[in-house]
Amino acid sequence: MTVALVTGSGGLVGSESVLHFGGVFDRVIGIDNDMRARLFGAEASTRWLSARLTERLPNYRHHDVDIRDEAAVGRIVAAYGRDLKLIVHTAAQPSHDWAARDPRADFTINANGTLVLLEAMRRHAPDAVFVFTSTNKVYGDTPNRLPLVERETRFEIDPTHRYAAHGIDETMTLDQSTHSLFGVSKVAADVLVQEYGRYFGLRTAVFRGGCLTGPNHSGTQLHGFLAYLMKCTMAGRPYTVFGHKAKQVRDNIHSADLIAAFDAVWRDPPCGEVFNIGGGRAANCSMLEAIALCEEIAGRRLAWRYEDEPRLGDHVWYVSDLRRFQARYPHWRITRDIRRTLQDIHDGLLAREAPLGLTA
């Protein structure tokens, strides 16, 4: 029997991983205790998606377990042992803003939880492949030192800079910057995953993601900006933009393209390697551009307001350079641009939340 384990299996990337690898492995094990509902409120709950996975996939087994619970996680991994071929670790406290409310919870979920999982793998399933979703927040606010040019709807990097053509690569320093507490906890986890690969010879890969999004995203005010932006547009809710004249730029990768990258790593695993991952130059937008697209797709105006004070450590411009990953896995590419991604988010929200007041 071949087994894949997915943490955060009720979340956006976790659920897409379950669906994809459910067709690859004999069994998929999910770990998710709906921490999002406790962090962000009922509308962020992932229980609906966990229930859907259980109903639709006969080879899926769900465990309502906290990833910080060393004994429980150890029992799950030990139960499958060397049958466990892949671990996709997406469970996290994912919000830049929320981390400051409870730094201990943020750090123990993101750093300690990752250590618990790595140790369980090392002891019971050392031949498995470990895929970790890190974040571009590990670079702190270093991207804000880049030479930026203000344009009508966005900030852009100076066209003469080496990052202009392809975006920010993995050589950017992690030091001497303001990370946010969320960034700190993810740095710790990021480096742990690298070290377990390099020191213990485990097959681990770190994906430093830009904005990860898609139709199954349970977006909230503090996390999942494109999904929440579309939800607010469709439901007539107010939305607040913080700082940078609403011209801050993010690259956004559709969950389907991210899972395709995970699959590539599973089939040809590295040891302790790091990859920047995101929409890159093919899929990025500013807040102003995202608002305009949401309004166009939803067919209604968004009631948004602007606060001049930006969030601490927030990036003004961030686009991922994908060339390192594409050099290792040349058959992988971005297949969904921002418009296609937002259309998928719109359609997904409409399908599952129309009874809650969302309209086309």
Image (spheres, helix red, strand yellow):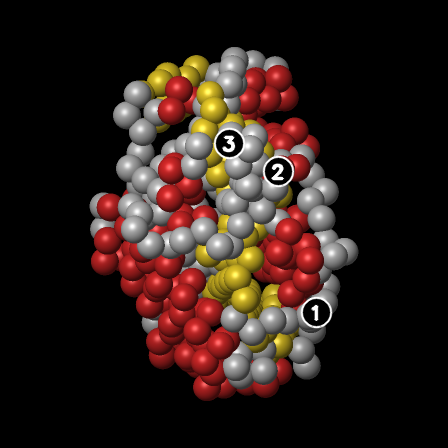
Q: Residues within 10 Å of mark 1 (few under 14, many from 20)?
A: few
Q: Which residue is mark 2?
A: 165
| Residue projecting furthest to the front | 160
Q: Residue at x 43, y 46 (%)?
A: 45
> Disc 3 and disc 2: Cα gap in Å?
9 Å
Amino acid at pointer 1: Arg
Quadrant assignment for the C terminus: top right
For mark 2, give the secondary structure. loop
Q: Is residue 79 above or below residue 286?
A: below
> Disc 1 and disc 3: Cα gap in Å?
35 Å
Q: Residues within 10 Å of mark 3 (few under 14, many from 20)?
A: some
Q: Which residue is mark 1?
A: 267
Disc 1 or 3, which lies upstream in sequence?
3
For mark 1, give the secondary structure. helix
> Disc 2 and disc 1: Cα gap in Å?
30 Å
For mark 3, give the secondary structure. strand
